[in-house]
Structure formats: structure tokens, C-alpha cells
Image (cartoon, grey):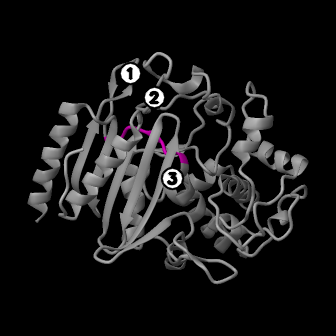
Amino acid sequence: MEKSIISEFAMLDSHIRKQNLFNGHILVAKEDNIWYSSSFGYASIRDKLPINEDSIFELASITKTFTAYATLLLCKEYNVSLDTDISTYFESFPYEGVCIEHLLRHTSGLPDYMELFIKDWDPTRIAKNKDVLKMLSTSKPTLNFASGTNWEYSNTGYVLLAMILEKISGLTFNEVLQKTIFQPLGMQHSAVYNRRVCDAKISNYAYGYIKNPTSDIIELPDNIPGYELVYFLDGIYGDGAISSSAIDLLKWNNAVLKNELPEDVLEMMFTQSKLEDDRIIPYGIGWFLDTDSDLGTIAHHSGGWPGYMNNNVVYLEQDISIIILCNQPNDIEQVQKIQDAIELITFQRNYSFP
């Protein structure tokens, strides 16, 4: 069976290369047994640096899986209840009844900070996490709904979680993740990295490129009109800002699959959320959760940002990971079609070439 899958991957790989359909890295593995790992295109167009399995991509919202795990772990270590009102940590926080678990499960109702910053922030200044809290405290926008009564994906909540982690531990967000995840799992190519803020440059970094809509030139989004947010939101972390490689993500996934992480923490991460009216939401803590009648529970999270389109998928009952990191998503629909074909091949279902 495995030999047949590998030959199918080889044919798809050849098709992708001939048609020049993808720029990035794709990895499929059953625990440590890698069935398919292939790189396409450049990490740096300027330096003609090709991508490899250790190339480091900005993960964008895949970061949330790590922020969530670190929060659960530190709350356990420091005896902090998930029911703790977050005003405990932020005196200026303008809302009542928002607790840590609301942030973790996207049930807080907090307004989206990106919309607030696009509207009211000086785009020549790089914002930090503390500026998100200050923006909420001064402008006091209305909650989208009472906390716990509904579900809405919230970048704001995960920015605040990163700040809470720093207050609980006395460490920086990067230090927390290095101590609790990256170093214990041997994830040597993973770190919190705000490219436009950090003085140090990461080697083998896969820069995110887009097609300039006015010239059709493939370039960094930094100086393209309409993409100013990649600069002025680059100092914010927790909802994003982790950079990592495909091999490091596989180490993270396998720690989940092999139960190398605390059992009670894993159980919370992969338990669907319940609202106050008992509605069930297919989101755990840090992961979206789908159920397939044949494959069982599928935990996944994507990450999108100008220049990046990533997806990390873990089939919990099948012990299989599919990792797709793309640093030139000029055709988002095309990247999705490739991802669909990869999944269909993995589970020996009928597919067509994208």
C-alpha cells in the first residue's frame, strides 16, 4: 500500500514541477516514516536560494496551536484556572467576564484588532502587543457578543494570551515557547520571529512573495500599496509570528500523535468547545477539529499572511501528518487543489491532477 502511495506522489510531483504550480515545501508522514517530502522553488528569489525541508517559513496563524499549548501547560504549572478573568492581568482591560478559556476557544467576543489598527494606527510605526491592549482600553469598542455565548475566530484573544504567558512566567513569549516546546522537542529551526523588528536575520528563511497587482512582478509585499499592514503589524505575536520548518512541524505533530505531551493537556486541546447554550463548535483549543467517518478525528490549522499560505493537518487516529508551507501563493485556489490531491493520494482515494 505504502509503495503505491509513494509512486502516486512521484507522478503528482512531476506534474507540479512541469506546470510550475507551487512554491514551497510539502511533507506527508506516518509518524516518523516520511512518505513524501518535496521542495519547490526559491526561499529567496534575490539570492536564488532554493527551498529545502529545513527552510523556515512564517507560520502565521498556525502559531496559535503553540500559543494554546503553552497557555495550558503554564496554567497547569502555575495553578492558574482557565476561568481566571483576564482583567486580573490587565488593569486597563475595559471588559468584564472575559476569561482565559474564552480566549483559548475563540468565544470571547473581542473585536478584531487588525480592523482597529487599519483604521486608526499610524502605518509608519510598528505596533506591539501592548498597543493592542492600549487600543482596546482607550477606544473601548463594543464586544461582538457576550463572552461564552458564541464563537468567532479571534486574533485579538491570542495576542492577549501571549501577554498573559509573559506575566505568568516572567519570560518573553519566545523564551516560553523555547522552554516548553521547541527545545524539548528538538525543534531547532523554530522561533518567534518578527522579521521587520529583529536585527538578526535567519538563515534559510523562506521569504513570502506576492504578485504586484500593478506590474505582475513577483516581489515582497513590503512596498506594495495596500499591504502596509505587513510592516506596521509586524511587532505583534501570539496570534502569529512563529517561524518554523516542515521537519520541525513534523516533530510537533509526532509529539501529539505519540502522546509525548501531558495527557490532560492533549485532552483539553482536542475536546470540542461548548457554548453556554450547549451548542458544540468543531474547535478545540488551538486546533480546528473535523470528523471523517473513515479517517476519524482530523486536527488542523492554517496560516495565511501576505506571501504565505500554510496548512498543518494531523489525522489523530491514522497517525498521519500533511504539512504544506507555501511562500508564493499567487493562486490560492491552485494551492488548495494541490492540498486536496495530496490528501486523496494519502488515503488512496480518487484524485485528479490540479
Q: Which residue is mark 3?
A: 62
In-front residue for pair 191/41: 41
Residue 109, position in %: x, y?
Answer: 73, 63
Left or right: where 255 falls relative to 85: left
Image height of 96 relative to 215, above or below: below
Pick whichever of labels 1 and 2 is earlier in the sequence: 1
Image height of 44 relative to 293, above or below: above
Give the amino acid at mark 3: Ile
Image height of 118 relative to 113, above or below: above
Left or right: where 292 falls relative to 266: left
Pick whichever of labels 3 and 2 is earlier in the sequence: 3
Q: Which residue is mark 2?
A: 209
User: Judging from the image, what secondary structure is the residue with disc 3 in?
Assistant: helix
Location of residue 146 by image quarter: bottom right
Q: Which residue is mark 1?
A: 45
Question: At 73% across and 55% down in the image, what residue appears?
Answer: 160
Question: Is 169 covered by the magenta stretch?
Answer: no
Disc 1/disc 2 C-alpha distance (Å):
9 Å
Pick whichever of labels 3 and 1 is earlier in the sequence: 1
In-front residue for pair 250/127: 127
Residue 133, position in %: x, y?
Answer: 81, 49
Residue 139, position in %: x, y?
Answer: 88, 47
Give the quarter of the figure containing the N terminus. Answer: bottom left
Disc 3/disc 1 C-alpha distance (Å):
24 Å
Bounds of the magenta span?
Answer: 53-60
Mark toward the viewer: 1 or 2: 2
